[in-house]
Image: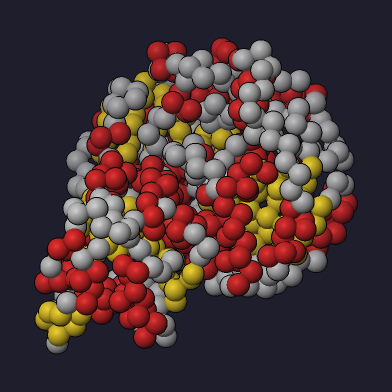
Amino acid sequence: MKLNGAQIVIKQLEAHGINTVFGYPGGAVLTLYDELYKASDKIHHVLTAHEQGAAHAADGYARVSGKTGVCIATSGPGATNLVTGIANAYLDSVPLVAITGNVSVPLLGRDSFQEVNIIGITNSIVKHNFVVREVESLEETLREAFYIANSDRRGPVLVDIPKNVQSDMCEYIGKIPLPVKRPTCSFDPDEVAKIIARSERPYIYAGGGVIASGAQEKLLQLSEKIKAPVGFSLMGLGAMNCDHALNLGLKGMHGRYAANMAASECDLLLAVGTRFSDRATGDVSEYKKAKSIIHIDIDNAEISKNVPPFMEICGDITDVLSQLLPVLEDKRHDEWTQRVIELKNEQQKQEDGYSTEGEFTSKNIIETVCCYSDSDTVVATDVGQHQMWTAQYYKVNKPRRLLTSGGLGAMGFGLGAAIGGSFAKNKEKTVLITGDGSFGMNLIELATAVTNDIPVVVIILNNQTLGLPRQWQTMFYESRYAQSMVDRKTDFAALAQAFGANGHRVTRLEDLEAILKNLPKNAPTVIDCPIDCEEVVLPMIPPGGSIKDMVIGG
């Protein structure tokens, strides 16, 4: 049958199981939007307030659902407004297909109205991108786009469709989607098992690849079988129950004391689905001392890029652990287990030493919010101090429940992601923990949440400053607070009400609890929580430092 290009896009979305998309219309995609209108019984389009919000929402939807996120924007500024969201998905390995319109093919390269070379702009932040110059290639291009986004290490793909291609007609074949590809894994499980058996102090460093692969149960089996404590990258949180005795929590620059110390003292580090970013390692020469490293990752380009391993295994985490687990011996490691217990006790003493029980502090606010959320609740963050406090104190006990910008560190990510995450769970309650600086970036998406009856609960840890820049300025720049003291007069509670959301400002934990007990089920709630700008995120390993430089606090 003959279809126009826009109809082919709809058919391909349906073929790939896409029933929710996020976007913002414009002149270069009106033909596509006309077909979306006709297909509204099959594909739900969520109109965001800004294209960046659409990209972040599609990202959050993908992370929670495990499906491919889809966002749509028009040419020119519409397309460029997606760039931050695309880059965020790229660095966090999120499957995303971004569809942009463009001027008609004869007008390309002529500086036409709202024309940009979005292919050139996004080359370094996508797995692949396409510009479709003839309608006959559109069906196959979209099949390839979804295939690439989901194969091997997942990530974003951009498809740029000029306006005339959307209206041109051709024969639609209707091929089935391409099967997702996983890398073949070739390694000797027995050799790995021998290395692990020789270890007396094994440690597992787990990242987002564990969750992407769905390997959380196998990670747990590995940890319990060899009695190895587990520290997590920011993206790996949720892969293991927080209360498990072997879970040491966040590792890295702002990681928990026990997680970092155990990583420093281990004689074997099993890195599973993580890429050793600078925030995780600090001084690499110190990081790799006195330990063997086995690096398991789906992307061969990440292995040896930052930390040279003793042994490298390239493959899907589920596949690798499925081959490894049967040949491993059960281990005890009594001395190592006791040492880990000692480290956890030391950590608890440190935290007790500067306890603020009952006070309106970031830790107590986050723990209170956690108490009024169940393990299935999706929690999102923006980027900054609140993000690190959330990683430290909010108990994320299930995979795909934490939405945070790990690699790019994009302020303004959280609200769009929380909205997308809610749509992925049939518009259930989601929580956004943010700061006043980050929230100001994309607060316009409150309009999207209100319009769509999304029960997102926004907790603003409001210290009237850009928290992490100020903390660094205190520690490394002799307290010269150059433009980090925001000190805005915005009334966030009144602002929320102006959008049609519920708005509150609270200064006591009991008042916060009262609001959390009576949240509306079909409307967003914004809770402004003023905190002291002197609060800092600790522990902290200074940039380029090592475990011996860790600032504990007091």
Question: Could you tell me which quadrant the C terminus lies in?
Answer: top right
Residue 411 % position (x, y): 54, 43
Q: In this view, does 305 lie to the left or right of 259?
A: left
Do we see residue 240 in this rendering?
A: no
Q: Residue at x 41, y 69 (%)?
A: 25
The answer to which image quadrant residue 205 occupies is top left
Q: Which of 195 and 124 is in front in this view?
A: 124
Do we see residue 473 in this rendering?
A: yes
Q: Residue at x 63, y 28 (%)?
A: 483
Question: Could you tell me which quadrant the N terminus lies in?
Answer: bottom left
Q: Which of 268 and 363 is in front in this view?
A: 363
Residue 350 % position (x, y): 74, 23
Q: How many labels does the image show?
A: 0
In the figure, 17 relative to 386: above or below?
Answer: below
Q: In this view, does 305 lie to the left or right of 87?
A: left
The answer to which image quadrant residue 244 occupies is top right
In the figure, 211 relative to 254: above or below?
Answer: below
Residue 381 % position (x, y): 59, 47
In the figure, 222 relative to 372: above or below?
Answer: above
Q: In this view, does 502 lie to the left or right of 95?
A: right
Residue 101 % position (x, y): 29, 64
Q: Nearer the viewer, residue 117 or 228?
A: 117
In the figure, 264 relative to 24: above or below?
Answer: above
Q: Residue at x 30, y 76 (%)?
A: 31
Q: Nearer the viewer, residue 206 or 405?
A: 405
Q: Which residue is drawn at 86% across and 46% down?
A: 507
Is the image coloured rainbow, by chain, by secondary structure, or in one colour? secondary structure
Q: Is residue 381 left or right of residue 199?
A: right
